[in-house]
Amino acid sequence: MSAAHSAAVKICGLSDPASVEAAVAAGARYVGFVFFPKSPRHVGIAQAAELAGQVPVGVARVGLFVNPDNALLGEVLKSVPLDIIQLHGRETPGRVAEVKALTGLPVMKAVGVAAAEDLDQLWDYGLVADMLLVDAKAAPDAALPGGNGLAFDWRLLVGRRWLKPWLLAGGLTPDNVAEAIRLTGAQGVDVSSGVESAPGVKDHDRIRAFVAAASGQGGA
């Protein structure tokens, strides 16, 4: 049996210093802060600035936004040292390009997938975004566009290639992430609710177990 390949890990929805420290210590390559008031993981600007300030060089600080206007982006970036903007709403490829130009930062675009026809968007967004996040498609009436703990059929991604680096998200846990990486060949994985004990409350043991499993060192 071939050795499992390792995937870079993004821990999203961090909202307290101890959880940021746990994610960094475990070996996460990306840490995510959510600027979306409807989310239980939402952080205010002053809070996010403090959290981002404790992230060491070599770990990318990602700001997650949902259909943000220019004023919000400007306000956040004035105080919070982000490395990547993540767009998790209904932003068009044109808007992705605008946000890149406005902020001068790389943009990661999340695309919801439920069926094979949803994959076509990944090509369009790959023309303008710097990275892609392949997530489970939220239900039309869902309050949140992501972080719902939903998975999709990972077999849809087998053998697929896109123009830009991509991360797999949606329903990942310490128990299934190694299998998801094996099936899809994902070079990176993103988790939020899968390492929580309650919505917005990160479980440090689950963070460690998730990173270990994604690194091919065994699961929880």
Image: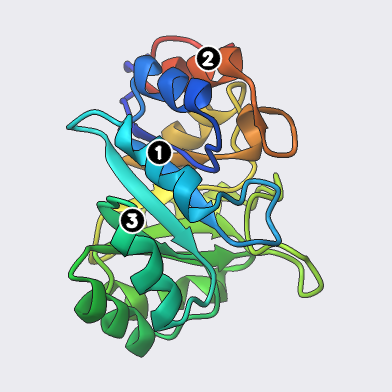
**Disc 2 residue type?**
Ala
Q: Is residue 94 above or below residue 56?
A: below
Element marked by disc 3: helix
Task: Choose the circle earlier in sequence order: 3 or 2.
Answer: 3
Residue shown at 21% from the left, 64% from the top = 105
Q: Mark 3 points at which residue?
A: 79
Residue shown at 18% from the left, 32% from the top = 58
- Of the 4 image quadrants, the one containing the C terminus is top right
Task: Choose the circle earlier in sequence order: 1 or 3.
Answer: 1
Q: Bin the neighbour count of mark 3 within 10 Å (Cα to Cα): few under 14, some 14-19, many 20 and up.
A: some
Q: In this view, does 116 lie above or below 55?
A: below
- Number of numbered tags placed on the structure image: 3
The x, y position of residue 10, in whole percent, is: 41, 38
Residue 4 appears in the picture as rendered: no
Query: Which of the two marks, 2 or 1, is nearer to us in this view?
Result: 1
Element marked by disc 2: helix
Residue shown at 31% from the left, 36% from the top = 53
- Disc 2 to disc 1, C-alpha distance: 26 Å
- Disc 1 to disc 3, C-alpha distance: 9 Å
Q: Bin the neighbour count of mark 2 within 10 Å (Cα to Cα): few under 14, some 14-19, many 20 and up.
A: many
Q: Are the residues tagged 1 and 3 within 8 Å (C-beta)? A: no
**Disc 3 residue type?**
Ser
Residue shown at 47% from the left, 70% from the top = 119
Q: Mark 2 points at which residue?
A: 209
Label annotation for residue 103: none
Label annotation for residue 50: 1
**Disc 1 residue type?**
Glu
